[in-house]
Structures are given as structure tokens and as C-alpha cells.
């Protein structure tokens, strides 16, 4: 298919690459043009100078940018996707954003006979690079049926969860789980060290039992080694938690642990760790060590 990919960050760059490897004709756009030029040199495809240019003639346009305002700009702005898109095309948004902005853009897209799916992903940079992301989707059956076989190029799991906005709400559930798990893992690593245990041996045993998780399997060793440069940054997690807590205020959900962990991440930011990965929660526990 002719597809476009808007946003070549740590996630979008490899995701667009998997689309090219799967045989699709890919036209990319990135705010920093040199990044788009590098992508074209590495993969078959081309790039547009604006989102509108990249979207021209594309049957599916994928977007993966930073936040709600970035999303509005690249889709609805002066040179946005909707200025170049054709009727009958589908917009697939992989940005982690609010459910509100997903519904807003869906309504605008409908006015141009354009399909829209909110489809945030989980799996981090490694998942994008290896093509094994989990994709949570909100939208209608027809758009999902057309887009999902293409999304499979970089996904191990794709699920339509309901109407537009459902994908973003599911991603909020994902981030709530991660925050609590990483804080618990940080406390466990800290406790093991303070107890004089060989932390590596302890986690090698318990990761295969009831306490095991993806976070434990993939982060306990780097945390023990005080290495925090492996993926999703604290600054981005706080952005996501802001979305989560805002939605909770609307729907009445009580999230005391999430709110507390959000403040712990604020502590890490104050320590200069905004670009460290989310497992750096451990650093605030070991500040005096």
C-alpha cells in the first residue's frame, strides 16, 4: 500500500522502517528534515517537506508525535495531514495522548470522509525496533479491518477495544500498571541491597515466580548496576501521568498510588534525571548512598 508516517522519533523511526521492509511504499515526514533524509537513506521510500505533502496519495497515514498539541499541529495545522489527505484514507494515531483529542480529531476527520483510529502502543523502543509492539485501538470496525494487517508489520498484538478514545484509555491503564510495578521493583532492589543479599541471585530466582513481570525481567539487572539509559524517559512518563490523572478526575477513578509515583518521578526530575528511563525511581531511594 501507499502509506505515510509522520514523526520519526525513537518509536516512529523503526516503525516506519518495518512498514518499508514489509513491502509498503512509505513516505515519511519529520519536523527535523535531516532525520527524514537519514531514514530515506536507510530504507526504501521518500519524504515530504510538510505533513500534508507526505499524506498526499497515502491510503493510510500513521502518526507518532509527542503530545496533544503536536498531534493537532501535524494533523489539523496549516500544512497538516488533513490538507493533503484523500477521502477514504485512514489516519492511525500512535501518539500517547488524551482520549479527548482522539475524539476531537475523529470528528474533524469524519467531515472529510477520513477514517481515524487512536492506536497507542506499548513495548518501548526495543519493541519498536524488534517489531513486537502491543497496539491498543479505538475506532470503527471498517477502519480497523483495513489498517490492522498493515500495523502487523511492527506489532505482536493488536486489539480493537471500542469506540474512538478507547485506545488512549487502555494506554492509561498500561501506564498505571507500569508506574506501580517500577516503584515496587525499585523498593525491592533497594531492600535487597540494604539487607546484604546478592541482589542478582535473588532476582534471578524470584523473576520466575509470582513476583515476576516484564519490568523485573528486563530492568532488575540494569537497576542493580545503576544504569538508567534504557528506553522510556521520566519526562515522558510524567506527561503520560498528567493525562492519566486528568482523566481520573473526570471519570471518578481513585489512583492514590499513581499520584504518589508521579510525585516520585517529579523528585527524579528535580535531581536532573528527566531524561533517565523510568526505572530511575531507584535513584531517589539511594540518594544518600
Image (cartoon, rainbow, N blue to C red):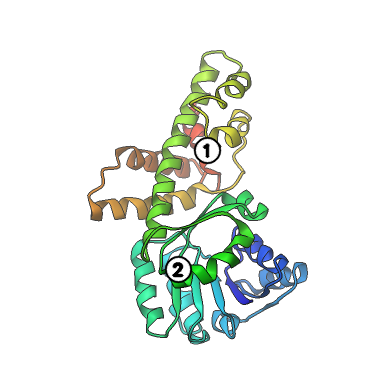
Callout 2 crowding tier (Cα within 10 Å): few <14, some 14–19, many ≥20: many
> In the visual, does 174 lie left or right of 49?
left
Front position among marks 1 and 2: 2
Tell me residue 113's x, y (percent): 42, 84
Q: Regarding mark 1 in the picture, which secondary structure is present there?
A: helix
How many discs appear?
2
Residue to which mark 1 is pinned? 280
In this orientation, does residue 279 appear? yes
Q: Who is closer to the viewer here, 113 or 191?
A: 113
Farthest residue to the left: give it: 252
> In the visual, does 199 lie left or right of 247?
right
Quadrant (top left/top right/bottom left/bottom right) for the N terminus: bottom right
Q: Who is closer to the viewer here, 123 or 78?
A: 123
Q: Residue at x 66, y 54 (%)?
A: 129
Q: Residue at x 41, y 67 (%)?
A: 139
Residue 50, image quadrant: bottom right
Q: Residue at x 26, y 43 (%)?
A: 254
Residue 41, image quadrant: bottom right
* Sequence-first disc among 1 and 2: 2
Q: Regarding mark 2 in the picture, which secondary structure is present there?
A: strand
> In the visual, does 179 lie left or right of 13?
left
Cα–Cα gap, marks 1 and 2: 33 Å
In the rendered view, tell whether residue 122 sits above or below residue 101. above
Residue to which mark 2 is pinned? 117
In the rendered view, tell whether residue 233 sits above or below residue 56. above
Q: Which residue is drawn at 57% across and 68% down?
A: 7
Callout 1 crowding tier (Cα within 10 Å): few <14, some 14–19, many ≥20: many
Tell me residue 256's x, y (percent): 29, 39
Tell me residue 8's x, y (percent): 61, 66
Amino acid at each position: 500500500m501507499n502509506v505515510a508516517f509522520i514523526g520519526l522519533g525513537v518509536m516512529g523511526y523503526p516503525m516506519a522502517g518495518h512498514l518499508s521492509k514489509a513491502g509498503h511504499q512509505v513516505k515519511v515526514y519529520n519536523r527535523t528534515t535531516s532525520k527524514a533524509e537519514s531514514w530515506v537513506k536507510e530504507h526504501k521510500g521518500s519524504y515530504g517537506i510538510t505533513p500534508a505533502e507526505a499524506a498526499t496519495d497515502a491510503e493510510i497515514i500513521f502518526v507518532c508525535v509527542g503530545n496533544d498539541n503536536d498531534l493537532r499541529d501535524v494533523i489539523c495545522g496549516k500544512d497538516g495531514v488533513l490538507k493533503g489527505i484523500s477521502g477514504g484514507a485512514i489516519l492511525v494515531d500512535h501518539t500517547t495522548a488524551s482520549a479527548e483529542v482522539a475524539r476531537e480529531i475523529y470528528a474533524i476527520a469524519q467531515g472529510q470522509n477520513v477514517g481515524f483510529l487512536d492506536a497507542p502502543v506499548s513495548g518501548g523502543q526495543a519493541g519498536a525496533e524488534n517489531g513486537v509492539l502491543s497496539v491498543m485501538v479505538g475506532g470503527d470496525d471498517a477502519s480497523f479491518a483495513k489498517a490492522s494487517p498493515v500495523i502487523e508489520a511492527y506489532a505482536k498484538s493488536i486489539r480493537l477495544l471500542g469506540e474512538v478514545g478507547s485506545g488512549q484509555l487502555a494506554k492509561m491503564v498500561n501506564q498505571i500498571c507500569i508506574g506501580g510495578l517500577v516503584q515496587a521493583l525499585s523498593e525491592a532492589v533497594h531492600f535487597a541491597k540494604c539487607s546484604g543479599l546478592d541482589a542478582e541471585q535473588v532476582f534471578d530466582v524470584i523473576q520466575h515466580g509470582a513476583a515476576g513481570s516484564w519490568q523485573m525481567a528486563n530492568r532488575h539487572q540494569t537497576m542493580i548496576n545503576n544504569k538508567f539509559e534504557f528506553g522510556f524517559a521520566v519526562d515522558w512518563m510524567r506527561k503520560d501521568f498528567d493525562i492519566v490523572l486528568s482523566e481520573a478526575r473526570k471519570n471518578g477513578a481513585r489512583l492514590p498510588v499513581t499520584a504518589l509515583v508521579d510525585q516520585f518521578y517529579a523528585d527524579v526530575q528535580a535531581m536532573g534525571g528527566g531524561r533517565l528511563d523510568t526505572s530511575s525511581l531507584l535513584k531517589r531511594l539511594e540518594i544518600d548512598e
